[in-house]
Image (cartoon, rainbow, N blue to C red):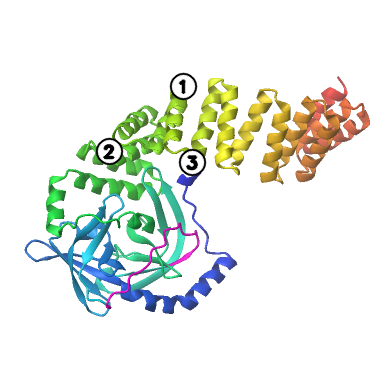
């Protein structure tokens, strides 16, 4: 499915990475001194004034602090503690992203005492160095550093950043900062099970929460959460997301199902349940859950999921309809949906529509090698050899060292009777892959077409040592 669903873990063992990390360490003390005043500890209290929890956060404006939503769970009062001992009361909540576990708090602080951090809204690079300043176990201003080990896109949810910098209890809500001192995300998810995997929710989601809104008191938030069945569902959703971030749908699915049991109108949970069911091969159940999701909140990802499930059930018309809905909702990022639509048309027996779908995928993503390969193969199956040659040449520009593509170009030339062009293509394939049995066979076959039996015999002799099966086939042509 979408390549963007795969987690790519980068190795730290290479010399270039070590050099980069060494350079990062040179500026780390200065960076920490600069950003430390912006990081805070957050203490919360219940209705009787008893301390509930302690977490972390950071200033993004003179009166705004970002933290995790769960840090202020059930709190009636909260305080922000700076690294130099100042204490500022929390006046209320400006905005909440429940699924992303983010809250923006209004804080009263005297002018000149706050240093807001800037947000980097772009996606970080894998291998990029990061720093986390939090308050684990009440140790205010503790610093950990590491790298961005993966940037993961989760369908219908968005992006999650995986980091190697440790996140301990009390560090939830800490800023994850790049080496320019910009916040790339909020430290939030931690999974332990033999190892610790630490995550951050990207700064882009913080930016989306900063547009005005009514100030809500902490006590009002508690009351609203108590009345809202969504609050319990969100907790289950976040637990499921923790496992999904590790691509473990088997463990994630029960939590998403629990979330929709708590709140049957929870579109995000239905979407993730549909995604996980499809990943586990439960196609009919995936369609059911994803349809519930699009009924509540139509999304390109859920329609794609419905299309995929129908495709595996060999219901190609239904698959095509769903892929088209996905493209309609997200026309500018629909390369994968167009590609999948092409596969559905292929198995449905609609060759012209198949070709057009792959061409649309290439239009949106010119370096989409799989689409180039599919459209070239579709042209060959339709006996449109000039178009196939052009498609293979475009593919060869993307994969210049691919012997198979050169061989395929040669076969298309042979179908057009362009033997000299075919010979050059097969020779190029052999040059790229000296043990390519099929290319030697095709080269021998081409020589026979020109009446050059001796050169064909040379290819046969070579094949005897590298690929006896192709040698036998060529011998059948030389000695019919």
Q: Residue furthest left?
A: 48
Are discs 2 and 1 less than 8 Å apart at CB?
no
| Residue 293 sits above or below residue 314 on the image | below
Q: Nearer the viewer, mark 2 or mark 1?
A: 1
Which residue was labeled with disc 2?
A: 257
- Residue 176 percent location from the top left of the image: 38, 65
Q: CA distance from mark 3 to mark 1?
A: 23 Å
| Residue 420 location, quadrant | top right
Q: Residue at x 25, y 76 (%)?
A: 111
Residue numbers of the magenta segment: 112-130
Disc 3 secondary structure class: helix
| Residue 412 sits above or below residue 301 on the image | above
Question: In the image, is 174 to the left or to the right of 5?
Answer: left
Q: Are there few (<14), some (14-19), or many (20+) residues within 10 Å of tag 1? A: some
In this rendered view, identify the residue nearer to me: 382 or 441.
382
Disc 2 secondary structure class: helix
Q: Are there few (<14), some (14-19), or many (20+) residues within 10 Å of tag 3? A: few
Which residue was labeled with disc 1?
A: 317
- Residue 334 percent location from the top left of the image: 49, 38
- Residue 190 percent location from the top left of the image: 33, 57
Lower position in the chain sequence, tag 3 or tag 2: 2
Q: CA distance from mark 3 to mark 2?
A: 31 Å
Instruction: Identify the main secondary structure in magenta.
Output: loop
- Residue 384 percent location from the top left of the image: 70, 25
Q: Nearer the viewer, mark 3 or mark 2?
A: 3
Q: CA distance from mark 2 to mark 1?
A: 29 Å
Q: Residue at x 59, y 41 (%)?
A: 368
In this rendered view, identify the residue nearer to me: 395 or 241.
395
Which residue was labeled with disc 3?
A: 332
Residue 211 visible to an observer of this rendering: yes
């Amino acid at each position: 499915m979408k390549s963007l669903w795969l987690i790519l873990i980068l190795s730290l063992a290479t010399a270039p990475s070590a050099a980069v990390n060494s350079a990062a360490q040179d500026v780390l003390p200065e960076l920490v001194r600069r950003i430390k005043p912006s990081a805070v500890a957050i203490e919360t209290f219940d209705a009787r004034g008893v301390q509930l929890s302690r977490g972390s956060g950071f200033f993004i404006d003179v009166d705004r602090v970002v933290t995790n939503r769960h840090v202020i769970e059930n709190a009636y009062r909260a305080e922000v503690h700076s690294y130099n001992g100042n204490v500022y009361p929390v006046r209320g909540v400006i905005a909440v992203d429940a699924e992303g576990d983010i809250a923006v708090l209004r804080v009263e602080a005297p002018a000149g005492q706050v240093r807001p951090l800037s947000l980097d809204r772009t996606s970080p690079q894998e291998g990029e160095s990061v720093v986390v300043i939090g308050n684990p176990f009440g140790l205010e201003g503790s610093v950990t550093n590491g790298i961005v080990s993966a940037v993961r896109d989760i369908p219908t949810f968005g992006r999650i950043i995986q980091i190697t910098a440790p996140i301990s209890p009390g560090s939830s809500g800490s800023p994850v900062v790049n080496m320019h001192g910009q916040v790339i995300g909020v430290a939030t998810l931690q999974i332990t099970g033999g190892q610790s995997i630490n995550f951050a929710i990207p700064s882009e989601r913080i930016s989306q929460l900063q547009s005005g809104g009514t100030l809500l008191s902490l006590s009002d938030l508690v009351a609203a959460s108590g009345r809202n069945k969504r609050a319990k569902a969100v907790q289950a959703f976040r637990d499921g997301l923790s496992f999904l971030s590790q691509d473990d749908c088997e463990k994630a699915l029960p939590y998403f199902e629990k979330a929709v049991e708590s709140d049957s109108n929870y579109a995000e949970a239905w979407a993730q349940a549909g995604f996980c069911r499809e990943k586990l091969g439960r196609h009919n159940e995936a369609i059911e859950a994803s349809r519930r999701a699009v009924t509540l909140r139509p999304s390109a990802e859920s329609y794609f999921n419905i299309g995929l499930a129908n495709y595996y059930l060999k219901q190609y018309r239904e698959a095509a309809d769903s892929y088209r809905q996905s493209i309609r909702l997200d026309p500018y990022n629909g390369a994968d949906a167009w590609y999948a639509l092409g596969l559905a048309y292929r198995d449905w027996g609609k060759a012209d529509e198949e070709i057009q779908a792959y061409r649309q995928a290439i239009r949106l993503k010119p370096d989409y090698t799989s689409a180039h390969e599919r459209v070239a193969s579709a042209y060959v199956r339709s006996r449109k050899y000039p178009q196939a040659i052009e498609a293979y040449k475009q593919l060869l520009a993307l994969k210049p060292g691919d012997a198979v593509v050169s061989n395929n170009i040669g076969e298309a030339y042979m179908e057009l009777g362009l033997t000299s062009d075919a010979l050059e293509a097969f020779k190029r394939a052999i040059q790229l892959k000296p043990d390519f049995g099929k290319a030697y066979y095709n080269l021998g076959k081409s020589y026979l077409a020109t009446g050059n039996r001796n050169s064909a015999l040379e290819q046969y002799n070579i094949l005897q040592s590298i690929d006896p099966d192709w040698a036998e086939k060529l011998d059948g042509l030389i000695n019919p």
